Amino acid sequence: RKGGGEEEAEEEEEEEAGGGTVASALSAAFSMATGVAEVILGPDPRVVEDLADKAANEALEKVIVGIFWDEDIHFFADCRRLTRLDLSHLGRNISCQTIRGVLLCFWGAGLQSLSLAGIPVDDEVLVLLALAAPKTLRELDVSGCRLITDRSVSRVARACSGLTRLDLRDTSENMTDGALLVCAQLPKLSNLGAGYLRSVSCMSLAQCIAHPCMEALDLTGCTRVDDSLFRALLPQDRQTPSSTLNAVSAAAAAGRRLTALSISFCDGISAQGLRDLAAAAWRLPVLQKLHLGHCTGAQDSDAVAMVLDSFPGLTDVDLTATRVEDAAVARLLRACPRLRVSEIIQLFELSALRIMPSVSMYTTKSCHH
């Protein structure tokens, strides 16, 4: 539809002519482009105006669409070649019935990536997804979907065994250990967002960090994470009663591919947990991104320094509101020549620091001298 600023009469005229719908604009765009493989739907109507011009480029792989109406569903029935679909920009005004209609259009097609982030979808939508694209789906983002439960997530994980990326951040209090344990069994899972899942125990998250294919793990705000997360990576000298810890430590490939780990706002991690993380550095040889911000239970400058000294390959570090001294940060800058981003906002014991020229961006706001 035409954006704001146009005369209302012109808009009504165009609607009556049948040329103002997103479906017609998309159909015109796709008739000129053969390389389009992804559609992003959003609330901004201005992007529709130049849609046809952009689609004339055959190399185009992504189309951002403005307002989406229920009657435009039929467009997707004619474009089953799409492999990537992002509906996250639609907001919370879209109905579950509309989303189900879109998914039905892709039943048995080659849908590989779907983002439903922030949309009020329910368990029925995810169950339908598990039936519609069980063999082709590789990436699924349901972050912020607080109506779904572990029942539907478990169903998707069991049906879509080829998933490599799964984002469950900030879903609901109904997400339990059962769903995470099923997800941890996905053979190719390499990227898992589990941030702010406050009902999930550290036992299940330890299974995820030990996944042999795991490359990026976000545990931000998981309040039940504790020191056992890192002890699980260490070899056990004695047999422990915990079969979970034994299983994790027995996995020879645990942590070998992990490049990004976020444990910010995990208050259950203590200074001893950071020491265990430093001791497990040999199990994490390619770790590049480490976020430790706001771990209030681990305010020990020596433990933080031990972690920083143990990972010379870091390129992205977040030490927000962390107790760390000058010497430790200076050693970090010397030891990590590829460091690109280092957020050290609200440090408690930082007094003076010379910034190395190799650091491309450095944030030092509100440091407590």
Image (cartoon, rainbow, N blue to C red):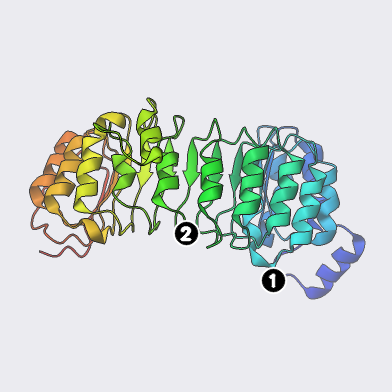
Query: From the viewer's perspective, is residue 28 above or below residue 22?
Result: above
| Quarter of the figure that contains the C terminus | bottom left
Find the distance from the CA under tag 2 to the CA under tag 1. Answer: 48 Å
Task: Locate residue 366, reporting x and y percent.
Answer: 20, 65
Left or right, 80 with respect to 194, comes to right
Figure quadrant of residue 348: bottom left
Give the amino acid type for the residue marked by disc 2 in the picture.
Ser
Left or right, 282 with respect to 66, comes to left
Which residue is farthest top? Answer: 252
Q: Residues within 10 Å of mark 2 (few under 14, many from 20)?
A: some
Query: From the viewer's perspective, is residue 246 above or below residue 103?
Result: above
Figure quadrant of residue 282: top left
Q: Which mark is residue 60?
A: none
| Quarter of the figure that contains the N terminus | bottom right
Q: Which residue is mark 1?
A: 5
Q: Which residue is mark 2?
A: 199
Along the line of sight, the residue nearer the viewer: 331 or 182: 182
Along the line of sight, the residue nearer the viewer: 266 or 140: 266
Left or right, 109 with respect to 198, comes to right
Which element carries disc 2, helix, strand or loop?
loop
